[in-house]
Image (spheres, grey):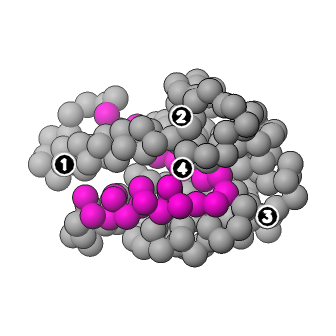
Amino acid sequence: MENAVETTQTGTLPALTLVLGGARSGKSRHAETLVLGHAEAIGQQPVYIATAEARDGEMAERIAEHRARRGDTWRTEEAPQALSDALAGCAISDQPILIDCLTLWLTNIMLAELDIAAETASLLDSLGRATGPVVCVANEVGLGIVPDNALGRAFRDQAGHLNQQVAARADRVDFIAAGLPITLKTLSQTG
């Protein structure tokens, strides 16, 4: 990936960053901080691509909490399934983009019985074509208990494969535990 530049929470981001963590670990807040810091440094409005669907009251509350926290600072695009299209449509300038989250997107494409391999390949292609930095948020679901049903195990496995593929392409990977970031990967930056 290009855009080899210094990465800090208040400075410039590399082309692709992946932020992983468990539920309520602080991964979205960390990713928002990264993107906002970059947006402020370059004087651009950040783009938030949301993949969540309010399938029940609890999820509707989570979505409302995220929207309230973001406020009007962000331009928000909804993409519960067509993530590649949304990314391609947003990536027309150097605006920083936050995708939150890949795990919910995977849930949506699995429930819609779409071709996971094809959708993932399309997403990876779109990530590689982005003209500005992209930060992706994803749940690390492989650290818990083994699901007791085939669908749960298939989801866990697909999420692990997706995270590995995005991490392999990412210039930076942060893992969030209890609100604390641990950088797992950074590529040496040469300008």
Q: Residue 141 at what x, y percent from top left?
A: 35, 38
Identify residue type, mark 3: Gln
Secondary structure category for the residue under label 2: strand
Is residue 132 something that shows in the picture? yes
- State the residue in front, 80 or 4: 4
Label 2 or label 3, whichever comes before in sequence order: 3
- State the residue in front, 95 or 9: 95
Q: Residue 57 at what x, y percent from top left?
A: 47, 66
Q: Quadrant of the C terminus?
A: top right
Identify residue type, mark 4: Cys
Q: Mark 2 points at which residue?
A: 173
Marks 2/4 in contact by CB < 8 Å: the verdict is: no
**The stretch drawn in magenta includes residue 43:** no
Residue at 22% in and 66% down: 115
Label 3 or label 1, whichever comes before in sequence order: 3
Callout in the foreground (4, 1): 4
Residue at 36% in and 43% down: 165
Q: Name the residue under label 3.
A: 45
Magenta segment? 117-142
Identify residue type, mark 1: Ala
Q: Mark 4 points at which residue?
A: 136
Callout in the foreground (3, 1): 3
Q: Name the residue under label 1.
A: 154
- Find the distance from the CA under tag 4 to the CA under tag 1: 22 Å
Q: In this view, does 14 lie above or below 56?
A: above
Q: Is residue 13 left or right of residue 153?
A: right
